[in-house]
Every structure is written in structure tokens, then in C-alpha cells.
Amino acid sequence: MALSPAEEQYSEICINPIALQKRLIQELLNLREERQQLLAKLRDLSSTPEPDRDLVASVNGALDLKGDISKQAGVPFEVSAKMLEMDLTIQILEQRISAMEEKKRTSHGRATAHRIKRLEELLKDYGGSQAFKQLQSDLGLSPSQFTRLVKCLDKRCFEIQRCPGAQRGEKMLILK
């Protein structure tokens, strides 16, 4: 079954987060380049002598896009709106990239990795599932330590469910 180019690109991004990151970086660079071109055009417009034209207060940096667009007298509304939209898009892309980089940095310590392996072995011995309290006592962990351990688990390999017919709030961990 042949995929269209758009479907092929989408499947590549879903499978490979690095491809997504590269694509976001490329889009960010393209937006920055477009922004620089628009700033150059704006500087050209501001160099034409006209009365009541206090357009660019700080040519050294970026324009104040966060301010009131109507205050920027000589700038057509579409250009200002486009630049504001581009600035917001750049900020969103930078946030996404930094979030992806932070996600990569988080890794488990040796003790946590050892506890996860031990937990997996216990679940295999119990037939694939067991109550939190039993696992907690088998591992010799306090409730807060066990909660932190459960938060570190890979949700693709482990599943958390309520115990059927048990007291309120009791949960069980299932090995997928």
C-alpha cells in the first residue's frame, strides 16, 4: 500500500521524534528569516521622510510587537499583524523544542532503574499483576517512594487500574 507524500512525512514524524525536532527547527529558521526580511522592508519604509512618522524607536533590536498595533503609525496593519503572528509562532516553537530537550535529559538513577527491574520481575512472578500495597511491601518502599517509582514507569509497559471488588482507592499494577 503506497502512502502519499504527506502521509509518509506524517508517519516519519510520528515514528521518529528527531525528525519532528529537525522539522520544527527548520520551520523556526524559516520564520526568523522571513521576520528579518520584513524588518528590512520596515526599515526601508521608515527611511522615507514623512511628518508624524515615529515608526522605529529602536532599530537595533526587534520592533515592539507586543504594544498596540494601532500606535505604529506608518506601518500597514497587515504587516504588523503578520509580524506579531510570526513572533508568537517563533515563541511557541522555541517552547516546544526546549520541552523536547528537557524530556530527553530526564533519566532515572541507578536505584530507580534497579527498582523498576525488580518490580518487573515481581510482576512476572505474580502472573502479570499485583496490588500496589503488596508490591510496595515486597520492594520495602514507603508509600511516597513507591508513588515516585510508579511515576517513573514506562506507561507502554505498565498499566495502572483499580482493584476489582477491593476497598476504595486500591490500585493494581499490570505488566502489559
Image: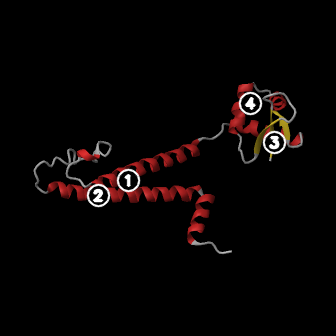
Query: Badge 1, how many Cα within 10 Å: few under 14, some, many 20+?
Result: some
Q: Which residue is mark 4?
A: 146
Q: State the SS at label 1.
A: helix
Q: Is residue 150 left or right of residue 20?
A: right
x then y, percent, for residue 165: 87, 33
Q: Is residue 51 left or right of residue 3?
A: left
Q: CA distance from mark 4 to mark 2?
A: 55 Å
Residue contact at pointers 2 and 3, CB within 8 angstroms: no
Q: State the SS at label 3.
A: strand
Give whichever of 57, 142 is nearer the camera.
Answer: 57
Instruction: Residue at 25% x, 55% y: name it.
Output: 76
x then y, percent, for residue 175: 81, 44
Query: Badge 4, how many Cα within 10 Å: few under 14, some, many 20+?
Result: some
Q: Which mark is residue 86?
A: 1
Query: Badge 2, how many Cα within 10 Å: few under 14, some, many 20+?
Result: some
Q: Residue furthest bottom?
A: 2
Q: CA distance from mark 1 to mark 4?
A: 45 Å
Residue contact at pointers 2 and 1, CB within 8 angstroms: yes
Q: CA distance from mark 2 to mark 3?
A: 56 Å
Q: Which residue is mark 3?
A: 174
Q: Earlier in the sequence, mark 1 or mark 4?
A: 1
Residue contact at pointers 4 and 2, CB within 8 angstroms: no
Q: State the SS at label 2.
A: helix
x then y, percent, for residue 60: 23, 47
On the image, which quarter does residue 118 sit in? Answer: top right
Marks 3, 4: nearer the viewer: 3
For badge 4, the amino acid type reads Phe
Q: State the SS at label 4.
A: helix
Instruction: Residue at 76% x, 43% y: name it.
Output: 158
Marks 4, 2: nearer the viewer: 2
Q: Earlier in the sequence, mark 4 or mark 2?
A: 2
Q: Which mark is residue 38?
A: 2
